[in-house]
Image (cartoon, rainbow, N blue to C red):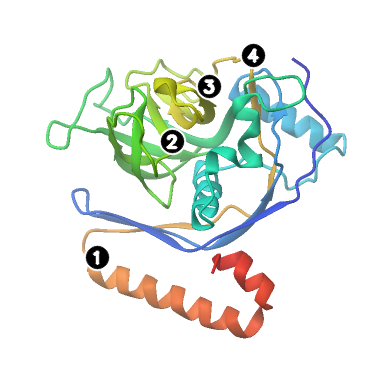
Amino acid sequence: MPAQTEVSVDRAFDMQKAASVYPLIGKVYTRSSHSFSCSPTLVRTGKNYYDSLQVLAEMIERGELPADTRFMMQAEGLGIENSYKRQEKDPRKAEEFRDYFAKNRDKVYMWEWTSTGLRVPKSWENGRVDNGTGKYPRIVLEGDKEVGELQVPSGGGKVIIESDEVFGIPTETREIALPHEGYHSHWYLNASPELDKVSGQYDVAVGRWGGWLLDEAEGCLVVAASYGRAAALSGAGFRPVRGSVPEIDVVSSNVDIGQIRRELSEQMRAEFAADVDRLSAVELVRKYKV
């Protein structure tokens, strides 16, 4: 499948500061606020994650995309979902996700490679689960960089109840019979991935797609850590995104978690107060969805 070359990276989104707290491993992660713009459609490659990165590089070299274009992070995909929820709109019907449901010119169902991945830590191979939590310890990747660690729930198409706002990875799932109003996404996890020969680790990509699971009339969004980054998928592609990659900070267990939460809240309030004076009413509504 040849790469699609008619791309407009003009859909703007703002993401506020975020924090996630993991008392059992003594970690607090914070992510800085950032803005990004993206294409409402995917670039179709029909290739694996690594080869799709090469397609991106070639498109930049040919001048078909700006030099700072990158893949979308899963946290940004979650941010797009949440932006529609704040407007009391159904994110499954968002234009940015139409490719997932074959609502495009040639009716092709698309899988989106994100820049996010999950890596199995040493001694947790072969689908080993943490018996204390019933979850799978995983290292979060952004590109080829390890940026954090968390525990993820089993997949199997369960409904996503909660997600880590810093990384965008589901943290709580549940079996919910139809209808599951208010929830729009399902989670799949390959708990025993094969060795990635490029990284030399047991990695899976975090991808996004859509489908009619459990016979939902409207279809649902899917977040899936199912395929290795070297797996070639005929319907695969990526979303061109512009905007700096946000800073992710790690706070160790010897810090007062409650204090971190209070400080983050104060920072967010201070940022909002500054924006009230700096931004126009239209810009303020767009950034904070108020």
Q: Residue at x 50, y 57 (%)?
A: 86
Q: Around disc 4, counting alpha carbons within 10 Å, would you say few (fewer than 14), some (14 to 19), or many (20 or more)?
A: some
Which residue sits furthest left?
132
Which mark is first along the chain, 1 or 4? Answer: 4
Q: Can residue 71 be seen at all in this image of the molecule?
A: no
Real-space CA distance between mark 2 and mark 3, rounded to the nearest whole angstrom:
30 Å
Which mark is first along the chain, 3 or 2? Answer: 2
Report which residue position mark 2 lands on. 185
Real-space CA distance between mark 1 and mark 2, rounded to the nearest whole angstrom:
30 Å
Q: Residue at x 21, y 63 (%)?
A: 254
Between residue 268 and residue 127, name the one nearer to us: 268
Q: Is residue 17 above or below residue 194?
A: below
In the image, is 40 to the left or to the right of 60? left
Q: Residue at x 21, y 27 (%)?
A: 129
Quadrant where the C terminus is found in the figure: bottom right
Which label is found at residue 234? 4
Q: Secondary structure at mark 2?
A: strand
Task: Name the kind of residue labelled 3 in the image.
Answer: Val
Q: Is residue 1 above or below residue 12?
A: above
Task: Name the kind of residue labelled 2 in the image.
Answer: Ser
Q: Secondary structure at mark 3?
A: loop
Quadrant where the N terminus is found in the figure: top right
Report which residue position mark 3 lands on. 198
